Amino acid sequence: MAYWLLKSEPYKFSWDDQCAKGEGRWEKRVRNYQARNNLQAMKPGDKGFFYHSNEGKAIVGILEVTSEAYPDPDDETGKFVTVDVKPLKPLKNTVTLADLKAHPVLSNMKVVRQVRLSVSPVTEEEWSLVCAIGGA
């Protein structure tokens, strides 16, 4: 199993929106090649953090990837993909970007180092630490 972080602006599509939607296509339209490659690497059963970007700047919930990557139906170029996800649970305590930056291990996460990347890998150690801090 691999771990990921998926970012979405809460004013466009929030954790609450994801929970109301349930399982389905990841709503963020990825148009970055590195993020696309990360989506292509996802496998059913992988877990991901749902991160509110721009507003809140915090990890707020846990998702499960439920499909392999497939062509994004909103991409007319045919270059980009998406995956299906389902919400698993919210974090009891949100884990903010400031929390990540302040932690010696978590300060190296891709979400801290590559702030514009909308889909990024998370190491097993980072996953465990964020889950512990978040009360998951």
Image: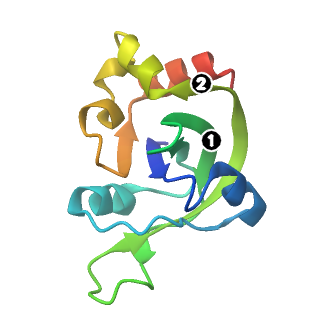
Q: Amino acid at mark 1?
A: Ile
Judged from the image, the secondary structure of the residue bearing numbered disc 1 is strand
Residue occupying image coordinates x 32% and y 30%: 112
Question: Relative to 48, is 24 above or below?
Answer: below
First of labels 2, 1 by sequence position: 1
Residue occupied by mark 2: 131
Residue 120 placement (x, y as % from top left): 35, 45
Residue 66: image quadrant is bottom right
In the picture, measured across the screen, residue 111 lies left or right of residue 44, that is left
Residue occupying image coordinates x 29% and y 68%: 31
Number of other residues with Cα within 10 Å of mark 1, as a class: few under 14, some 14 to 19, many 20 or more: many
Judged from the image, the secondary structure of the residue bearing numbered disc 2 is helix
Residue occupied by mark 1: 62
Q: Amino acid at mark 2?
A: Cys
In the picture, measured across the screen, residue 41 lies left or right of residue 5, that is left
Rendered image: mark on residue 101: none
Question: Relative to 129, is 27 above or below?
Answer: below
Number of other residues with Cα within 10 Å of mark 2, as a class: few under 14, some 14 to 19, many 20 or more: many
Measure the C-alpha gap from mark 2 to mark 1.
9 Å
Residue closer to the observer: 119 or 112 = 112
In the picture, measured across the screen, residue 135 lies left or right of residue 119, that is right
Question: Relative to 58, is 64 above or below?
Answer: below
